Amino acid sequence: MAKKKLLIDLSILKNTNCGLGQVALNYGKYFKEQYTPNPEYDVYLLVPESFDGVFGNNVQYLTINWWRKHFLSLIPKFDAWHAIHQLSHFRPVNKSTKYVLTIHDTNFMYEKRERKQKKLLAKLQKKVNRADQIICISNFAKKDTERFLQINKPLKVVFNGVEQLDRGEASKPNFIVNEKEFFFTIGEVKPKKNFHVLLPLMKLFPEKELYIAGRTGGDYTEKILSIIEKENIKNVHLVGMISNEERIWLYKNCEAFLFPSLFEGFGLPIIEAMNFGKPVFSSQETSLKEIGGECAFFWENFDTVHMKSIIDTNLKLFKEKPELSLNNIKHARSFSYSKHMMEYETIYSNLITNQTI
């Protein structure tokens, strides 16, 4: 009997600078470095042409071309198909293909206007209706999915895998202007990241620097730059996009990681920072308290004095108790890609062999 065929949609590799692109890249690294072929099925990766063959010989490749992008019916039939996020243009056309859909968040229900919300919700509902198995990346994401969508099939939580960046090469960025201790944060500079609350906070830490890394542009970036200029804040730096090596250096050398975000389906950066044993100060919004657990320090509100007090108290505690750094590393390791993929491989096998999930 011919082996079954599983397609994993990594088409988002066209943009490895975004969070989902990094997830896809780490899937690829897993198949190249850790994967043992399954006797029940062959794995095919749907990738841009530039990634053909990049992830080793234990998988096969289906590359994206103009015809496959515009005529989905030209994609060969697969027994199972995994969309690793809900935004992909690609989907299985054949009705017999088992479809695994991973939902990262429904942030558009908070960020968009009503007309756009309805359009995006209807689009996602169609994918949910087609799916045989729905995966959410956190219990918060699961709760929101059940809140906004009509769900009448299995829904399971599989936490995101987090790459162990501390094993990678580090490169000191050119924008590091002095030897002062510094705080670090990262994310696309959008209102949901709530970075502006860090500006008055840093006025209370004149002896330290804050580096905000991530894609800039738009009204929110202009708002932050305007506040920095008007209030003459010298120790906050919007540094834009950074390389992976620079990101590693900043995590490795920062005094603490600050993350005041308002909307996160998972909150990947707080686990990345914990991989380096760093203290993490975070909002407790959406998924962040769930993912940070007992290892992160949470602000109850964004009052500047309160935020500074939480940082001062717990930075001192962190320096006095080295075991807290070790606890953070242990917590971060629990989100390994090997554990993440092991859960998915069980789901794949059960779907392909028609077992109960």
Image (cartoon, rainbow, N blue to C red):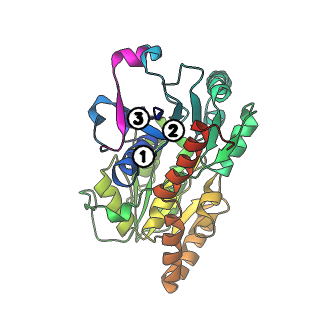
Answer few, some or many: residues within 10 Å of disc 3's Cα (few below 14, many 20 plus, some between 14 and 19). Answer: many
Q: Tally the marks.
A: 3
**What number is the disc on residue 236?**
none
Magenta residues (range)? 57-70
Element assignment for label 3: strand
Q: Quadrant of residue 62?
A: top left
Left/right of residue 67 with respect to residue 257 in the rendered view: left
Marks 2/3: CA distance? 13 Å
Left/right of residue 11 with respect to residue 55 in the rendered view: right
At 75% across and 38% down in the image, what residue appears? 147
Q: Earlier in the sequence, mark 2 or mark 3?
A: 3
Check the image and report above or below for 71 versus 124.
above
Marks 1/3: CA distance? 12 Å
Label 1 sits on residue: 27
Check the image and report above or below for 278 versus 124.
below
Q: Nearer the viewer, residue 336 or 19?
A: 336
Q: Earlier in the sequence, mark 1 or mark 3?
A: 1
Q: Which of labels 2 and 3 is toward the front?
A: 3
Is residue 318 covered in magenta?
no
Label 3 sits on residue: 44
Which residue is outermost to the front?
1
**What number is the disc on residue 84?**
2
- What's under tag 1, amino acid-wise? Tyr
Check the image and report above or below for 320 versus 62.
below
